[in-house]
Image: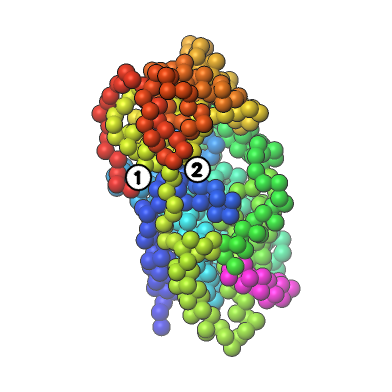
């Protein structure tokens, strides 16, 4: 008979065997974070830029991206990735290792969540057959660490529903604190699920209110120091990034995104990317509903988990498929419960799900297929690597960018981005960047009041001019062309449609299809660090 710790270790090994291969197969930001809408994982370049900066230059309490403070979310993911880079060296594997470990650990906990081995194995296999689970296990994104924290907190509650034992109680609080430090208010969702469970469970199966509140207070106390530090040292920046943009603008009035109702948006994509999980979960709602009527503690906790997740997805107005990763563990557990509908086939279900994993591997390009880390490269990445290796230091401006901000992850390149912004949407995205001179118009760039903006940055706690004019706005293509003509000293990466006539003072060099480099004819060169093979 295999002991529970040994089963947990075997589940972790199985998860590692399926999730670790291909960790470096996809370039930075090249996988599709939303394969239905063909949206690449652009946020990975932001976290990569910040983690590299921390690993090389420090200032760990307040991470930066492209020279400016990065306070949209607490920095736990960036800390972990930067530490991994410091310990293991500069590589994609080091950058992505924290997310991979989180995915392996969360998979093992889902397996152990249901004490019945067949149901636990089915839930594990459903996770490991899910394309989104594979994608975010191999990306430097906040979503997988958040899901691990969510799963760990509710696993502790499942093992000790009254939170009376010291270890589950402290681990429950620590998991919530870590979730907050990964993704701000989303980290509180396990506590919300625990409250829902406490309201529905029998008195003998739920924690005392004082015990639950104490755990919540401990979690907040653990997450508070970083927040209090930022409020004290960088109050304006912290309010603008963390509260105004991330919570209020994106949560209540996002600048862009799908107009679909939340449940339709996420439901369509969950069905398209994993019909097996979606259909099994729908079937599993029948036995779950029966068990909820009997007020079985495990089912009440699972129902509370589902309710907390889907309520949050509906309440947050910005539609973003990575958020749905929170729903996959409880959906897998619900789907595993569908074996109650066919008790005679329960022993065959794991074999069927294992066959589904093998079958999905034969169709890696399908929405529901498993690519094991492979993805279509970003076309601009290879030309930008080649440009980086030339050592040119004239200053690179990427017009109408198509690189998912990949260039920002190349050390010392320090690119600027020229956006076509006829409606002012880019300026509205981060309005404080306009005030600070991070986002400027082409005319403001041409006559940049550096002392004014440097003073504003300093008053907001940043004693550096590095982020000045890193985003440049042109209202029309003709304005963009005029800007290029006005700066023969700079290098440009531009679409053919924005390239001025050949007498612009630049040498032309092909880039990716439909784009070219306009290179200053008075080059300046600087030594560069060699790039890792798979960066």
Q: Is residue 430 above or below residue 375?
A: above
Q: Is residue 395 visible?
A: no
What stretch of residues is rendered in magenta? 276-295
The residue carrying mark 1 is: 535
Q: Is residue 259 visible?
A: yes
Model colouring:
rainbow
Tell me the number on the disc at residue 43. Answer: 2
Residue beneath the point at 46% across and 23% down: 501
- Residue 388 on the magenta span: no
Indicate the quadrant containing the C terminus: top left, top right, bottom left or bottom right: top left
Q: Which picture quadrant has residue 158?
A: bottom right
Residue beneath the point at 63% across and 27% down: 422
Residue beneath the point at 51% across and 22% down: 481
Q: Is residue 333 above or below residue 444?
A: below
Seen from the viewer's position, the closer of residues 39 and 128 is 39
N-term mark: 2 or 1: 2
């Amino acid at each position: 008979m295999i002991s529970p710790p040994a089963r947990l270790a075997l589940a972790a090994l199985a998860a590692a065997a399926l999730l670790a291969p291909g960790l470096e197969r996809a370039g930075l930001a090249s996988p599709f974070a939303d394969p239905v809408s063909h949206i690449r994982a652009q946020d990975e370049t932001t976290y990569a830029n910040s983690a590299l900066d921390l690993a090389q230059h420090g200032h760990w309490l307040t991470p930066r991206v492209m020279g400016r403070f990065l306070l949209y979310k607490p920095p736990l993911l960036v800390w972990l990735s930067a530490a991994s880079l410091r310990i293991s060296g500069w590589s994609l594997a080091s950058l992505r290792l924290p997310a991979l470990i989180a995915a392996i650990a969360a998979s093992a906990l889902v397996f152990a969540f249901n004490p019945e081995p067949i149901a636990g194995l089915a839930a594990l296999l459903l996770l490991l057959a899910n394309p989104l689970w594979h994608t975010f296990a191999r990306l430097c994104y906040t979503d997988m660490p958040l899901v691990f924290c969510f799963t760990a907190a509710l696993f502790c509650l499942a093992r000790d529903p009254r939170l009376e034992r010291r270890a589950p109680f402290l681990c429950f609080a620590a998991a919530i604190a870590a979730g907050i430090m990964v993704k701000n208010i989303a980290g509180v969702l396990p506590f919300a699920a625990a409250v829902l469970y406490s309201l529905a469970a029998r008195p003998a199966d739920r924690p005392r209110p004082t015990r639950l509140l104490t755990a919540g207070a401990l979690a907040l106390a653990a997450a508070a120091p970083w927040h209090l530090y930022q409020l004290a040292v960088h109050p304006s920046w912290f309010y603008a990034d963390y509260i105004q943009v991330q919570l209020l603008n994106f949560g209540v009035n996002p600048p862009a995104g799908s107009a679909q109702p939340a449940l339709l948006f996420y439901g369509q994509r969950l069905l398209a990317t994993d019909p097996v999980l979606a259909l099994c979960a729908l079937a599993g709602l029948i036995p779950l509903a029966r068990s909820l009527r009997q007020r079985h503690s495990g089912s009440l906790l699972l129902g509370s988990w589902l309710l907390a997740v889907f309520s949050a997805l509906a309440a947050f107005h910005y539609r973003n498929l990575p958020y749905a990763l929170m729903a996959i563990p409880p959906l897998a557990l619900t789907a595993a419960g569908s074996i109650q509908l066919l008790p005679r086939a329960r022993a065959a279900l794991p074999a069927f799900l294992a066959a589904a994993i093998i079958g999905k591997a034969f169709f890696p390009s399908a929405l529901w297929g498993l690519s094991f880390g492979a993805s279509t490269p970003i076309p601009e990445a290879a030309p930008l690597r080649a440009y980086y290796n030339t050592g040119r230091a004239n200053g690179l401006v990427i017009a109408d960018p198509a690189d998912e901000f990949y260039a920002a992850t190349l050390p010392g390149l320090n690119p600027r981005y020229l956006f076509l912004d006829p409606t002012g949407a880019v300026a509205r995205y981060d309005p404080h960047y306009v005030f600070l001179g991070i986002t400027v118009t082409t005319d403001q760039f041409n006559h940049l009041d550096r002392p004014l903006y440097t003073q504003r940055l300093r008053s907001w706690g940043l004693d550096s001019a590095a982020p000045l004019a890193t985003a440049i706005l042109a209202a029309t293509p003709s304005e963009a062309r005029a800007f290029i003509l006005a700066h023969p000293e700079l290098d440009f990466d531009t679409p053919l449609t924005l390239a001025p006539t050949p007498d612009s003072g630049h040498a032309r060099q092909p880039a990716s299809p439909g784009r070219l480099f306009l290179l200053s004819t008075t080059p300046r060169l600087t030594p560069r660090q060699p790039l890792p093979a798979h960066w």
